[in-house]
Amino acid sequence: MTTTIVHAGELVEDSWTLIEDGRTAIEAGGGKIIVTLARWQAERESLLATHAAVGVLVPNTADIEATHADIADRPLIALQFPTFADGRALSQAVVLRKRLGYRGELRAVGDVIRDLVFWLGRCGFDSIVPRKDQSPKACQEALRELTVAYQAAADEHTPVWMRRRTRAAALN
Amino acid sequence: MYRYDDTDRALVTQRVEQFRDQTRRYLAGELTEDEFRHLRLRNGLYQQRHAPMLRISVPYGLLGSAQLRKMAHVVRKYDKGYGHFTTRQNIQLNWPKLEQVPDLLGELAEVQLHGIQACGNDTRNITADYLAGVAADEHIDPRPYCELLRQFITLHPEFYWLPRKFKFAFTGAAVDRAASRTNDTAVHLVRRADGAIGYRFYVGGGLGRQPLLAQEMNSFVPESDLLRYATAILRTFNRFGRRDNIHKARIKIVLREWGIERFRAALEEEYAKIKASAEGEELLLLPEDIERMREFFTAPDYASAAEAGADIAAVAARDEGFAAWIKRNVRAHKIAGYRVVFVSLKAPDRVAGDCTAEQFEALADICDAYSFGEVRSTYDQNLVLADVAERDLYEVWRRLDAVELATPNIGLVTDIVSCPGLDFCSLANASSIGVTHDIYRRFDTLDAQYEIGAIRITISGCMNGCGHHSVGHIGILGVDKHGEEWYQVTLGGSPGNDAAIGERIGRALARDEIAAGVERLIHTYLDLRCDEDETFIECYRRVGMEPFKVRLYENEAEAAAA
């Protein structure tokens, strides 16, 4: 059974399989898998030998900078939302994107409801796995729920104070 | 005051539509109670005892006449004809209907008002010195910085789902009129010896269950780094604030558990990393950014001292009511010929902080005619007309008095700070409005109030402490004991430069004892003070708790001895 997710603003069928700890990774058929950070750190070589691609699921309590050396080259990093109102992974995402320069796929998993999606997009998540009962289409649309913002973020916005500088310069 | 541009307008307008859709989905059963709770709180909507409560943000306490007129309109159309000013300078409506709230917010958006982040686990409305720009003791006007930070924290993508609420307060004056250190972060504008402007940051304050005062983290952050340092604080909080226990989720708990040195080290490390990164470049404020914002808060077009001035004493000699009002409700202004006028929201038999539609309208007219079209809300739940010419004082008094806004009691015993308590709030354990009235009645002659002098009585109906009982000279906390209302008394608290958390005096008093108890405490002070110049708090600090305690419980001691 495939899952529809939002990736780079489009609805797509998910090509990754999340492998919970305790399950044999090879079950996923040697394709693209996501494993926990602990497992990745313990089984890095064997996972790479048996799978086309390995992504890492990082707990939202992890120090993302301390972890960075281990995960910087991963094609996908998944960050967790135990509840939609727990915003720790938003800070992890911003630090990954803006400070550490991570350019791979950044995925939000867990209690992801459409009303969280706008904030996810702005913090640099380009891969959103909606909670089972959520409409992927509604989540996709929620990325553009508001079209204005004051701050710069990991999206196209420049901060309002910079835009006003430009405007003032144009008037002079 | 600040005037919205296209960005600000688009943001509040789109926000109303976003909330309209969320409300629709909730009413259609598409959002759970818990999901909608988080969303409505971030639009100012709280579930109260009788109805939803809508908290409207008043950025740093500044309101224009168009906003006052709109308030008059919305309290008539959507509520029961009045609003309530809080200790955080905001306005609360107690009776809106959920399904009408999107329309209400839409009307507020027309005049730059909103409920964005007025409640919920996010960065709340910024509070500030209500005399910003007019106080003689001010070195830097904090309002441009408040507005820069207000915009930065509004719908901030990273800091929208924090562990708990987060409050900023600003001051740029010698006297702290913003109770700044009771906030999660206090920002004091400072000027260094070389003339450079910067910020002294305090972190970790908060009232409620464990009242603590914010501690100094950095004595001089340069003016350009307001958003950088705020980001460092908020990111540290978002990462490390506890999410396992709502009562331990404020930043003050991180600070207490880590200790100040470890906390400061973590904060400074994050600040250093921000400065060194591309993010730091983005967050850097240029002088022109600050200058552009400062232009919204320039001094109004004051008349000359000769034109604006008047012989107030001569008028006061002819009118006792005016004289009393001048004495208590009118203060000095930095410009000769002008005065600061306090508007008392503490009239007899009124609820502290309440303002009716008629009063909102009268205030709009009065401030348009006599105070450059603006009023400010204060930390003490009163209002201020900040720029009144002396020649207009009599007329202003007459017009305020006509709508019961001229009770001459600012800073006196009947100027009681109080939350709405059990009568409205679903969190409250005990009533505060009734207690306020009982205390008020015991001291309602002006002579008695003048005799007692400056005193701060504060009442909260529960631990959450919205009435700031922890920082009252006499603080009263309503508690529930086996279904009965009791009142715990603290003494010696203060929110200002001499900020202190009050100490508990002893066992709680019953509902029918509390007003008499407060009276005994005040008589103790009157008996013990050195002279009329020694205030209640000064006297308490000199003599200590004991004589107050003995007097408060004297009846019990007698009963036990008999």
Image (cartoon, rainbow, N blue to C red):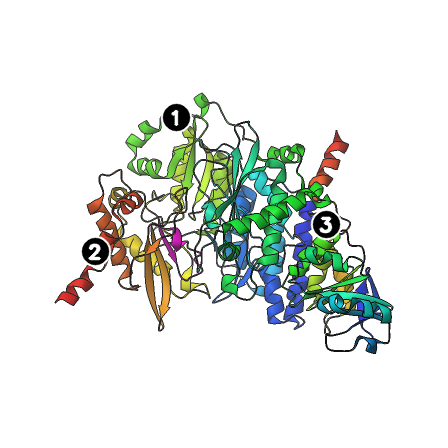
Q: Quadrant of residue A10?
A: bottom right
| Residue drawn at point x = 55 percent, y = 27 percent | B194
* Chain hosting mark 2: B
According to the image, label 2 marks what residue?
B551
Q: CA distance from mark 1 to mark 2?
A: 47 Å
Q: Nearer the viewer, mark 1 or mark 2?
A: 2
- Please determine if labels 3 and 1 lie on a single subunit: no
- Please determine if labels 3 and 2 lie on a single subunit: no
* Magenta highlight range: B456-473
Tell me the crowding category of disc 1: few under 14, some 14 to 19, or many 20 or more residues within 10 angstroms, Cα based: some
| Residue B297 shown in magenta | no
Task: Looking at the picture, tell me which residue is in the foreground, B485 or A99.
Answer: A99
Left or right: where A95 falls relative to B386? right
Instruction: Specify the amino acid type for callout 1.
Output: Ala
Name the element at disc 2: helix
Which numbered dot is residue B310? Answer: 1
Name the element at disc 3: helix
Q: CA distance from mark 3 to mark 1?
A: 61 Å
Instruction: Specify the amino acid type for callout 3.
Output: Arg
| Residue drawn at point x = 49 percent, y = 60 percent | B94
Classify the position of the N terminus of chain A by image quarter.
bottom right
Which numbered dot is residue A99? Answer: 3
Q: CA distance from mark 3 to mark 2?
A: 62 Å
Task: Looking at the picture, tell me which residue is in the foreground, A35 or B252.
Answer: A35
